[in-house]
Every structure is written in structure tokens, then in C-alpha cells.
Amino acid sequence: MPSIVQKDCVVGVAYVLKDKAEEVLDESLDEPLYYLHGHKNIIEGLEKNLEGMRVGEEKDIVVLPLDGYGEYHSDLVMAFDKSSFPEDVELEIDAELSAETPDGTVMFRVKEIGDTEVLMDANHPLAGETLYFHVKINSIRTATSDELSHGHIHGPDGHDDHDH
């Protein structure tokens, strides 16, 4: 078993994620997050800062937007004619909707609903945000050859029932 977080290890990390106002945005204290280190399965700024940590070690990590979910791009906020939405779609503020584009599926969040237009935002909800993590490494193990070839983990112990 590896003794430190390094490339090709499966890491179990407990975390609390807060914004600059110290509001908890997400946490994984009871059920750690398991990921394959060095394979871009988590945001870059967090992954870089976990490198070299040991089981039981705790750390506070600040991730700037560039190493998190990117900067906020106002050009990703677009107005759409309300009549262009299917009748069965319920439009609510912060609802997430997907749209097929020539470049693939794009996720949008409903930002504003007007009388004739709907303002949609394709930025990640945490784009432009500095992220404040408190982390604790719960476990480290060597990834299986299947996990390495697939680029993601197959459960905390390396076994999962999914097909590729």
C-alpha cells in the first residue's frame, strides 16, 4: 500500500467546502470522496494540494477560480425566447437544463425568467469562486489495472458492478 497520496492511487478524502462567506457548499465527512489521483477526476487545485499527504493528515486548502471551476464568463449568459422551450419544461430560477449543440451537450442554469425571455447561464455554478476546503485523508490504496485503464475508480475497494 502506498503511504502518501500520489499518481495512480485511489484516495479516500473527507472534506468540507466553504465559500468566502464561510457558507458550507458541500461536505463529505461521513462518506469520504474516493477518486483516482493524477487523472483529473477532481478539480486541479484540490488535487495538486492533496499530493504527498498521508492517511490521517488534515489540511486547509484554498483553490482560486483558475484551478477550480474557472473564471466566470459573462458571454456564457444568454437570453432565449420563452416560446423556444418545450411546454413540458418547468422554468424555475436555478433549474438546470441541458441543450444539444454542435459541440455536444451543454448544461444551463435558469438565471432570470421574464415575460418573453429566459436568461440562461452556462457557467459552472462555482465559476469565479475561490473555494475553501478542509480535508482529511482517510485512505490510500493502489489502483487496480482496470481502474487505471478506465481512468476512474471502481468503488472504495476497487470493485464495482458496472460494465464498460
Image (cartoon, helix red, strand yellow):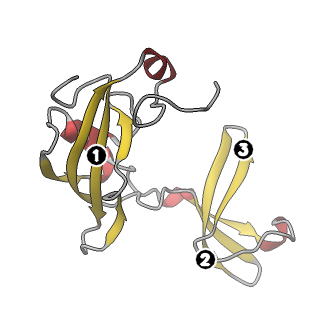
State which quadrant residue 130 falls in: bottom left
Residue placed at 57% from the left, 57% from the top?
A: 122
Q: Give the residue type that dot 1 points to.
A: Val
Please give the name of the residue rendered at 34% of the width and 49% of the height, measured from the top-left corner: 32
- How busy is the neighbourhood of tag 3: few (under 14 within 10 Å), some, or many (20 plus)? few
In the shown orientation, is residue 81 left or right of residue 92? right
Q: Mark 3 to mark 1: distance in Å?
A: 36 Å
Q: Position of residue 53 (x, y in %)?
A: 15, 37
> On the rendered image, what quadrant is the N terminus found in?
top left
On residue 93, the disc is: 2
Does 99 sit above or below residue 159? below
Q: Position of residue 98 (x, y in %)?
A: 69, 54
- Of the image marks 2 and 1, the number of the one nearer the N terminus: 1
Q: Nearer the viewer, residue 69 or 117?
A: 69
Query: Which of the labelled discs sits on residue 143, or is there none?
Result: none
Q: Which residue is mark 3?
A: 101
Q: Which amino acid is tagged 3? A: Thr
**Distance in Å between CA atoms under marks 2 and 3:** 22 Å
Q: Secondary structure at mark 2?
A: loop
Q: Residue at x 29, y 28 (%)?
A: 141
